Each structure stands twice: as structure tokens, then as C-alpha cells.
Amino acid sequence: MAGLLDGKTALVTGGGGGIGRATALAMAREGAFVAVADLTRESAAATVDAIGAMGGRAEPLGGDVTRPEDVAALIAGTVAAFGRLDIAFNNAGVAPHQVGSLQQKTHLWSEDSFDRMIAVNLKSVFLCMKHQISWMLAHGGGVIANNASIAGVLGLPSGTAYVAAKHGVIGLTKTAAIEYAADGIRVNAVCPGFVETRMTKLAAALHGDAIRARTPMGRLGLPEEVAETVVWLCSERARFVTGAACAVDGGMTAM
């Protein structure tokens, strides 16, 4: 039986671990050739090796997605490796503790922390979409999935710039979906709840019981569960889906 993404080429940012790695593996399993992008080629290598071990084809790419020249190079590297770009998953991101704002309310956030969060979690999505859409417009269309968050539809205490950035990702997603629907380009977002990754390890340690209590399914999610949603959104089975923000959160946003 053919895979959901047979013969397609996909670019995954933040593919060195967590949701990005799980999605790159799932896409490869479904027949895609995968360009795995991370901050360095070395940090993407383990994911590429895992794809190779399962018989897939992948290429490691390194670059800072907050820099337009690096983003352009990621697109060029994907096309150089596989000849085209059909699918993009814009996943790279950071958590508040990674910009020095752990458990800080809005008035305590520094401008530097705010600016860094917006650069990595919002501006990078804009830059990636800008270059991906330009290529797709010239080559017959494609599919983009952006990693937002439940923080894109909810407020989270001490999440100030993270929440602002993820709301922005959903806004970018909906706007681009409308703008390019007639051009054969679909754009959607996934909104994970609390998922077991390196990035959420500290939050889970500090607030794990409260998180599980707020989640109807009573647990944290797995990266693979988000990956399956991304794969579906990027497949022909979701060909009438664009502009959606799909919750993968164990029911948290239904509360």
C-alpha cells in the first residue's frame, strides 16, 4: 500500500528532536523524502540517521530560521537534494525558560527576552512561509503546516511573548490560507497541548500534576501523536482543509 506522502519532498524545521524529529520520521515512513533542518547540520544528523535506518531518504540542513539568508538556503538545500519542495512543517521554536523568562509575569519580561521569543517563534514562521510560498507559487503549489500551540488560542500565565507569538502563528496561517487557496497552496496549523519533549521537561516537572488535571485525557501528549496530525494535514486526505488550527491536546482547549 502506498504511503500518504509517497514521492513528496518535505522540509521540517526544528527536526533535531521532539515534535520535529517525530514528524520527520512519520513523513519518511509515509514515503516522503525529508530535508531535516536544525540549527546545525550536526544537530539534524541523528534524525537523518534514523530515517536512513528505516530505509528512507533524508538530508541534514543547518541554519538559523530567524535569518532570512539562512531560510533561503534551507529552501535551496531542499531543492538541491531532492529537486522540489512539496511540503513544509515550520516547527522550530523555544519556550520561555529558553529566553530567560521562566515563570515571569508580563511586567517582568525583559525586552530582550520578548524580542528573542518573537524572532524565533513568530518571525521565523513568517520568513519560512515567505520563501516556501514563493517557491510553491512558481512550481504548482504545495502544503505548509505551522506548529502553533494551545497558547495560540488560550492565555497562559507567565507565557507573555510565547502566547503572543503563537497567536500570531495562527493569524499568519489563516491569512496565508485565504491568500493562496486559489494557487494550490494549503496552509494549516497544529496546536499541541503539553507534549513530552525536551522543551517542556521543565514545565512538566514544575506543573505536571496541574497540567494533567486540566487535560481531560489525564496525561501529556507524545510527539508522535502530533506528528500523525501533521502528516494527515499534509496529505491528499486533507485536500479540502486549509486555514485550520488543529488542537492536539487531549481535550484541554475543550474545557
Image (cartoon, rainbow, N blue to C red):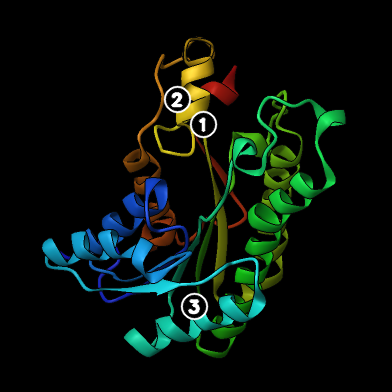
Check disc 2 and report its element: helix, strand or loop.
loop
Q: As rendered, which of 42 and 124 lies closer to the eye?
A: 42
Q: CA distance from mark 1 to mark 2?
A: 7 Å
Amino acid at the residue labelled 1: Gly
Residue denoted by label 2: 250
**Quadrant containing the N terminus in the rendered view:** bottom left
Q: Which mark is residue 74?
A: 3
From the top left corner, tell me how far across and down residue 206 is, in percent: 53, 17
Drawn side of residue 135 relative to residue 130, left or right: left
Q: Which is closer to the viewer, label 2 or label 3? A: 3
Is 159 drawn above or below residue 133 in the view shown?
A: above
| Quarter of the figure with residue 172 | bottom right
Q: Which is closer to the viewer, label 1 or label 3? A: 3
Residue at image position (16%, 67%) is: 52
**Quadrant containing the C terminus in the rendered view:** top right
Check disc 3 and report its element: helix, strand or loop.
helix
Regarding residue 211, the answer to whether it shows in the image is no
**Contact check, label 1 and label 2, Cβ < 8 Å:** yes
Amino acid at the residue labelled 2: Gly
Residue denoted by label 1: 193
Residue at image position (59%, 46%) is: 148
**Contact check, label 1 and label 3, Cβ < 8 Å:** no
Label 1 CA crowd tier, 10 Å (few <14, some 14–19, many 20+)? many
